[in-house]
Image (cartoon, rainbow, N blue to C red):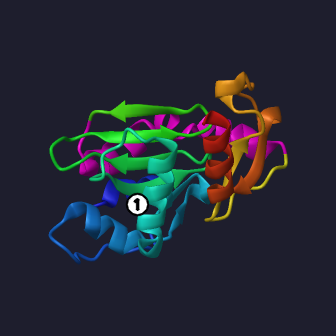
Amino acid sequence: MFSNFLNFFMSSKLKYTKRSDDIYLDFVLNFSGQVFGNGIFRVSNVSELISMKNMVKEGFHELSDEVKVIGFDWLGRVFISGDSENEKIYMCDIGAHEILEIPTSFLDFVNKEIPMYAEEVLAVSFFNEWTKTGNGAPEYNECIGYKVPLFLGGADDVENLDKIDLNVYWSIMGQLWG
């Protein structure tokens, strides 16, 4: 079911097993806590779904209680699925303090948007630029965040990035925005 996603990240070691009739839950149960693409994308750990949802809602109060956390990228942007009434994915970017809407279903986001539009969705070139400068990829609980957030005029370049704990980054950026 998630073969395009796994093939894109060359994750042949991971196998999909149907565990639920809910596609979102099935994805999270199968790939909970997994790091893909040398840290470019991480699937949220099942045990952290509620705390991550709360973290995102603290940064963006306008979000519905029905949102579901899918995962997060190397820049600390958290991807959530909308409530059950719509077929939209939202990229919550605390460093720019904006929510970008991706008008697609959860399954299409995972199997089509990420593999086909990885540059737009995951900023692959920017990630490669970061790692080519000798900087390491983030661990599961880390992100590469902006030293000076974009919403405060920070530059969108490698010199303005630093490795930081994901929760700390979201907390600091939320406080700066507030």
Relative to residue 137, is residue 172 depicted above or below? above
Q: Residue at x 70, y 48 (%)?
A: 144
66 left or right of 86 in image? right
171 left or right of 79 in image? right
Rendered-image quadrant of the N terminus: bottom left
Q: Residue at x 52, y 44 (%)?
A: 59
Relative to residue 173, is residue 7 depicted above or below? below
Furthest toward the front, the residue is 178
Q: Secondary structure at mark 1?
A: helix
Q: Position of residue 118 (x, y in %)?
A: 47, 39
* Residue 154 lies in quadrant: top right
User: Is the residue marked by circle 1 packed among few (<14), some (14-19), or many (20+) residues within 10 Å?
Assistant: some
Rendered-image quadrant of the C terminus: top right
128 left or right of 6 in image? right
Give yes or no for residue 127 being in the magenta stretch.
Answer: yes
- The residue beneath circle 1 is 6
Q: Position of residue 100 (x, y in %)?
A: 42, 31
Tell me where the magenta segment starts and ends, as one range.
Answer: 104-133
Give yes or no for residue 90 being in the magenta stretch.
Answer: no
Q: Residue at x 69, y 47 (%)?
A: 172
Q: Position of residue 169 (x, y in %)?
A: 67, 50
Q: Is residue 119 visible?
A: yes
